Amino acid sequence: MKLSKAEIILLLMTAIWGLTFPVIKGAVAYVPPFAFLSMRFFLATIALAFFIKPEFTAKNVKWGLIIGAFLFLGMACQTIGLIYTKASRSGFITGFLIFLVPIFDYIVFRKKPTLFAIIGVFLALMGLYLLSSPEGGGFNFGDFLTLLSAAFFAFQVIFIEHSTTKYNGDTIVFFEIASTFVLSLLFSISRESWNFRLDIPLLIAVIITGVFATALALLMQGKFQKKTTTVRAGIIYSMEPVFALFFSFLILNERLPEKGIIGGFLVFLGMLISNFKIQKSVIN
């Protein structure tokens, strides 16, 4: 598949998303998870404010807050989950949201999934089974939280698609990120101690996740995804767990067992297949 300039930028953005898994796992070893999310989304909100001029209408704000609640729940479960599971496993399990999106889309908005989406779900379930088997590493509390985060992220995706086609997308994204910051800060103040040091590795993690993986990634996605097809963009985004596996090995020296690797490959294969489309939906 020959990549255009826009697709290369989307691939680089996906690589940054993959990089965040070992970066966040390293950060939450030294700072409470909600405190880290507070710093990440505060910086992302400030960065977005330089590029976006929000339109303060009731509908824009309402949808931004609703989607922000799902983003917060997803990020909270994923970040806490990284305390208990490997960053590489978290990348593959988070990728499960791609299969949950058509299922939830059908439940909420009655959008019919394609045959390829259903095949992709079955492949991913087989992969998830291998990942969670004792030989594949077992299914732990962190894996459960990560799987729960995938469900919240799936709802975030379908509500973004539903709302941004009717209302101002930039404004919705701004309030989504800002509300995630506020919720993270409230939870951190009420549940955590801020007795930690703002050292260089932590600041680097906040900058990577807040500026590059959140604010810049959202801006680049909005600008360049429309210059390619949905299918090709979906295939590019499917590379996120692969990058997570690569960077987790490079940074944390994490290794998956043999069955875990096979399971991850099946999840990845399912993600690729689910991005193909046919004209006729298979659920009536």
Image (cartoon, helix red, strand yellow):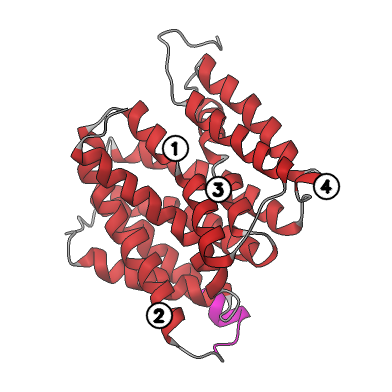
- The answer to whether mark 3 and mark 1 are in CB contact below 8 A is no
Mark 1: which amino acid? Ile
Residue type at mark 4 is Pro
Q: CA distance from mark 2 to mark 1?
A: 32 Å
Q: Position of residue 111 (x, y in %)?
A: 47, 22
Q: Secondary structure at mark 3?
A: helix
Q: Nearer the viewer, residue 4 or 282?
A: 4
According to the image, label 2 marks what residue? 203
Whether residue 168 is visible, yes or no, is: no
Q: Is residue 243 visible?
A: yes
Number of the label disc, if any, that sits on residue 158? 1
Residue 134 is tagged as: 4
Q: Is residue 188 magenta?
A: yes
Marked residue nearer the N-terminal end (2 or 4): 4
- Label located before the other in sequence (2 or 1): 1
Q: Amino acid at mark 3?
A: Phe
**Mark 1, secondary structure of its residue:** helix
Q: Secondary structure at mark 4?
A: helix
Q: Earlier in the sequence, mark 4 or mark 1?
A: 4
In the image, taking residue 253 as reference, residue 233 lies left or right, namely: left
Q: Are marks 3 and 2 in contact (CB under 8 Å)?
A: no
Between marks 3 and 1, how big is the CA–CA gap? Answer: 10 Å
In the image, what residue occupies the spot 28% across and 35% down?
165
Q: Dots 4 and 1: beta carbons under 8 Å?
A: no
Residue sitting at x 45%, y 88%: 198
Above/below status of 77 relative to 220: below
Q: Are marks 2 and 4 in contact (CB under 8 Å)?
A: no
Sequence-wise first label, 3 or 2: 3
Where 112 sits versus 168, above or below? above
Q: Which residue does the numbered mark 3 point to in the structure image? A: 152
